[in-house]
Image (cartoon, rainbow, N blue to C red):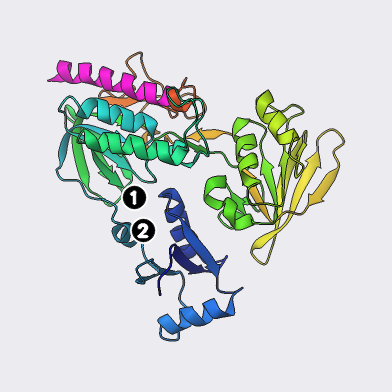
């Protein structure tokens, strides 16, 4: 059996299926999801390849090989992702493989320093799942986020940066004049300096029903999951540039794309508002708050919304929901180790060093950062220069 895409045979209620699909999504690996409860032929196929047992997820790769209920480590190995480093000690360790981390890495590596980047998801960070990057200097015609991420990754490799994927640092521990980054699978890597460039993640609504539907009918990435809604009705939550950009992208697939904003005013740029207004299959509703998601048979049944001007509660029906309401910093790794602002963003001095000597922070996770791709790359370069001076001081 050969196919151009990985096929994931699953159900909507299976936690291992959600984990596997989340892994593919994080690594930006395209796949076809097949719900065996909706497809009798798929059900029969799963039973056939599993000796009569209905085991999910059953994952079929383009070469015809199978993995049944695989761990993330098994998936990483199958995809050829490097998860173990060549050595135990480096001049510098960077946690995070977005524009900040990769830029800092190539700046340091081109000077002959040994640099290790550890990234748990897809290289390129949030930029990698952006439809079009049209405000990054040097690309007057714009560039897709995926291509930009690929180019940045290739450039880092070109200068000799070592990169681990599908791997996560669980803690950072001072050891004398060194810092030790310990992965969740208990592998230790030491360095004189560590750069935290873990970025930020999409904020959730934290309303009833949301957790149950994430990955099924609630999503945070239009590029990853928009194709599931061909010819269907989609609701986008959020009033900023990201929400409007992603909503416009979703019109490639969905029959209708509506936007709901909890504030009386929209924050998206005038250009984006005009683009949305020009689309016949898009509407924008302001001053409405999402109160809950009703779940029926493990799927989205109703979106419960309150009109904040009249307090009227409404029930809307949509096939899928995409949430774009801002970012939360990925700073839990150092929550007990460094000083942070009230929102969890990491505080640094003017050299971008945190309150823990040798630990630097740059990009979206840093307090005061501007949350733009160009700024993130710029902070990566700045961090590299600051760390270079620090390494000279500590020998």
Label 1: which residue? 166
Label 2: which residue? 72
Name the residue located 39 percent from the left edge and 38 percent from the top edge: 149
Q: Is residue 389 magenta?
A: yes
**Would you place residue 96 above or below residue 31 in this image?**
above
Q: Give the secondary structure at mark 1.
A: loop
Residue at the bottom extreme of this rendering: 52
Nearer-N-terminus badge (2/1)? 2
Name the image quarter holding residue 244. Answer: top right
Q: Depth check: 120 or 173 in front?
A: 120
User: Can you give x and y, in whole percent of width and height, for residue 26 in the image?
Assistant: 43, 49
User: Can you give x and y, in whole percent of width and height, for residue 61 in the image?
Assistant: 38, 66
* Circle 1 residues within 10 Å: few <14, some 14–19, many ≥20: many
Dots 2, 1 in contact, CB < 8 A: yes
What's the magenta region?
375-395
Q: Is residue 184 visible?
A: yes
Q: Give the secondary structure at mark 2.
A: helix
Q: Is residue 245 magenta?
A: no
Residue at the left extreme of this rendering: 395
**Would you place residue 2 above or below residue 224 in this image?**
below
Is 133 left, or right, of 357 in this rendering? Answer: right
For the C terminus, give its image quadrant: top left
User: Can you give x and y, in whole percent of width and height, for residue 237 in the image?
Assistant: 67, 41
């Amino acid at each position: 059996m050969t196919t151009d895409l990985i096929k994931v045979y699953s159900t909507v209620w299976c936690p291992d299926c959600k984990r596997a699909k989340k892994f593919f999504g994080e690594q930006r690996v395209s796949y076809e999801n097949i719900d065996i409860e909706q497809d009798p032929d798929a059900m029969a196929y799963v039973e056939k390849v599993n000796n009569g047992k209905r085991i999910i997820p059953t994952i079929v790769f383009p070469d015809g090989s199978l993995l049944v209920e695989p761990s993330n480590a098994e998936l990483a190995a199958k995809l050829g992702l490097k998860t173990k480093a060549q050595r135990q000690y480096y001049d510098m360790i960077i946690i995070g493989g977005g524009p900040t981390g990769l830029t800092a890495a190539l700046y340091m590596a081109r000077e002959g320093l040994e640099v290790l980047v550890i990234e748990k998801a897809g290289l390129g960070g949030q930029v990698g799942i952006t439809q079009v990057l049209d405000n990054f200097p040097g690309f007057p015609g714009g560039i897709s986020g995926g291509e930009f991420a690929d180019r940045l990754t290739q450039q880092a490799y070109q200068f000799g940066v070592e990169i681990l994927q599908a791997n996560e640092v669980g803690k950072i521990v001072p050891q004398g004049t060194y810092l030790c980054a310990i992965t969740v699978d208990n592998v230790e890597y030491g360095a004189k300096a560590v750069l935290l460039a873990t970025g930020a993640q999409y904020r959730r609504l934290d309303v009833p029903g949301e957790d149950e539907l994430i990955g099924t009918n609630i999503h945070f990435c239009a590029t990853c999951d928009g194709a599931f809604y061909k010819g269907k009705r989609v609701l986008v939550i959020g009033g900023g540039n990201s929400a409007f950009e992603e909503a416009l992208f979703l019109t490639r697939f969905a029959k209708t794309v509506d936007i709901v904003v909890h504030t009386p005013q929209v924050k998206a740029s005038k250009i984006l508002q005009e683009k949305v207004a020009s689309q016949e299959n898009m509407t924008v509703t302001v001053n409405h708050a999402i109160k809950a998601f009703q779940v029926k048979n493990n799927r989205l049944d109703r979106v419960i919304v309150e009109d904040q001007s009249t307090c009227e509660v409404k029930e809307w029906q949509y096939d899928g929901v995409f949430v774009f309401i801002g970012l939360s910093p990925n700073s839990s790794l150092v929550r007990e180790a460094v000083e942070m602002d009230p929102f969890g963003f990491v505080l640094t001095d003017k050299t971008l060093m945190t309150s823990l000597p040798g630990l630097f922070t740059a990009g979206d996770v840093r307090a005061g950062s501007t949350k733009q791709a160009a700024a993130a790359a710029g902070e990566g370069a700045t961090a590299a220069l600051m760390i270079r001076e620090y390494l000279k001081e500590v020998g």
